[in-house]
Amino acid sequence: MDLSKFSLEDLLLAAVKSEVESKAIYEKIARSVSNALLKERFEYLAEEEDKHRRFIEGIYRGKFPGKEVKLPETTPVPLPKMEFSSEEVPLSDILTRAMEAELAAHEFYKSLAERFSSEEDRETRRILQFFSSMEMGHYHILKLEREVVERFEEFEDYNPMVHIGA
């Protein structure tokens, strides 16, 4: 992902905004699923997004002392959003969108880490690279969950009355 045309401030604010929005989506999904293990996974992902947000805000404060971390309404940085227009969206579709967002976050953090090339920024670069690998871990968690959900949805399609009388 080429981030060279964006200012560091825009990139950091976009990252914070993305983490805040991702956390909110994961919390919403966690509240809406009844499966305890799936709920736990989404709560875990929400907490991970919050940890990333706090760290990125720390970088922002270090690079722009005295400036408030103020999230923009929109951001010029092209990061996918996990938006859903309806409560009727199948969970497998939600998981697919979340996977796409995690993959984009992986690429974003990998590229953002390159912006911290000085020796004094070495630790920040390492942590952003670690975030990049964590986002891939989140992607794989979501992929496994999607496979399970797809099997369940497929079973429901072929056996719509399976739960009747249970």
Image: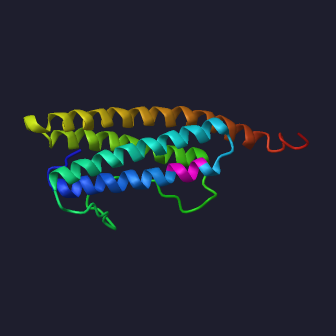
Please give left or right for residue 86 compared with residue 134 in the image.
Answer: right
Q: Percent x, y for residue 27?
A: 53, 50
Foreground residue, 69 or 142?
69
Magenta highlight range:
26-30
Q: Percent x, y for residue 115?
A: 15, 43
Q: In the picture, residue 40 is in which quadrant?
A: top right
Please give left or right for residue 135 compared with residue 92 in the image.
Answer: left
Q: In the picture, residue 36 is in which quadrant?
A: top right
Determine the residue positioned at 55% across, 48% down: 93
Foreground residue, 22 or 50?
50
Per the picture, the main secondary structure of the magenta-coloured stretch is helix
Quadrant of image for the N terminus: top left
Location of residue 93 with respect to 144 vertically, above or below: below
Number of labelled discs?
0
Q: Percent x, y for residue 101?
A: 40, 46
Please give left or right for residue 45 compared with residue 13 in the image.
Answer: right
Determine the residue positioned at 55% across, 37% down: 41
Task: Single out the residue that lies furthest toward the bottom.
Answer: 73
Foreground residue, 162 or 105?
105
Location of residue 48 with respect to 21 vertically, above or below: above
- Is residue 112 visible to the viewer in this orientation of the structure? yes
Q: Does the magenta stretch include residue 54?
A: no
Determine the residue positioned at 27% across, 57% down: 13
Q: Percent x, y for residue 65?
A: 16, 57
Please give left or right for residue 37 compared with residue 13 in the image.
Answer: right
Task: Single out the residue that lies furthest toward the front.
Answer: 66
- Is residue 80 visible to the viewer in this orientation of the structure? no
Determine the residue positioned at 36% across, 53% down: 18
